[in-house]
Image (spheres, helix red, strand yellow):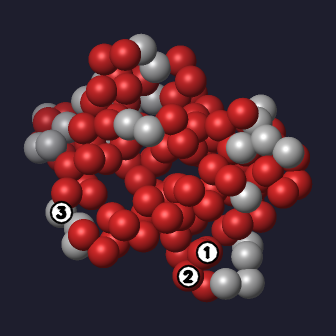
């Protein structure tokens, strides 16, 4: 996982900052698996978007995204998700969705948040 994507994940899901190396490998595997199912053009667009996320903050704060504190990173993502350019807004929301997917699709995430659901649904309660 790139440092930029890791910074996005910890900004979108602040609890991710406490993940250990094994959990980060899970997050990376989940995101990588999803991206592998997407067309190469979309993956290239994501790379361009991550580059923009990394370097646009230099214009305002004089530092790249990965060098900012979490509050400023959240401000940057918030500003980009409200940008006038529809394609940029969609990209940021897609990036946010990837971050949430990577964190909450981990096997341990359900237990971390107290979710006790069962694939069998209500039948499991009987």
Residue drawn at 62 percent across, 32 percent down: 14
Residue 51 is tagged as none
Q: Would residue 111 be seen by someone viewing this image from the given angle?
A: no
Residue 35: x and y in percent read 27, 57
Q: Earlier in the sequence, mark 3 or mark 1?
A: 3
Would you say 114 lies left or right of 84 here?
A: left
Secondary structure of residue under mark 3: loop
Mark 2 nearby-residue class (10 Å; few <14, some 14–19, many ≥20): few
Q: Which residue is mark 1?
A: 89
Res 110 quadrant in image: top left
Secondary structure of residue under mark 2: helix
Which one is nearer the viewer's eye here, 93 or 124?
93
Distance between the alpha carbons at the discs numbered 2 and 3: 21 Å
Mark 1 nearby-residue class (10 Å; few <14, some 14–19, many ≥20): some
Residue 87 is tagged as 2
Residue 34: x and y in percent read 25, 55
Residue 9: x and y in percent read 52, 41
Residue drawn at 22 percent across, 72 percent down: 39
Distance between the alpha carbons at the discs numbered 2 and 1: 5 Å
Q: Earlier in the sequence, mark 2 or mark 3?
A: 3
Residue 37 is tagged as 3
């Amino acid at each position: 996982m790139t440092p930029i994507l890791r910074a996005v994940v910890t900004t979108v899901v602040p609890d991710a900052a406490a993940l250990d190396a094994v959990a980060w490998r899970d997050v990376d595997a989940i995101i990588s698996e999803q991206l592998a199912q997407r067309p190469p053009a979309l993956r290239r667009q994501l790379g361009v978007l991550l580059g923009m996320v990394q370097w646009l903050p230099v214009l305002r704060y004089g530092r790249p995204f990965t060098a900012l504190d979490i509050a400023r990173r959240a401000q940057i993502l918030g500003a980009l998700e409200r940008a006038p350019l529809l394609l940029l807004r969609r990209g940021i929301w897609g990036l946010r969705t990837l971050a949430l997917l990577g964190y909450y699709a981990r096997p341990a995430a359900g237990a971390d948040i107290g979710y006790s659901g069962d694939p069998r649904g209500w039948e499991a309660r009987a």
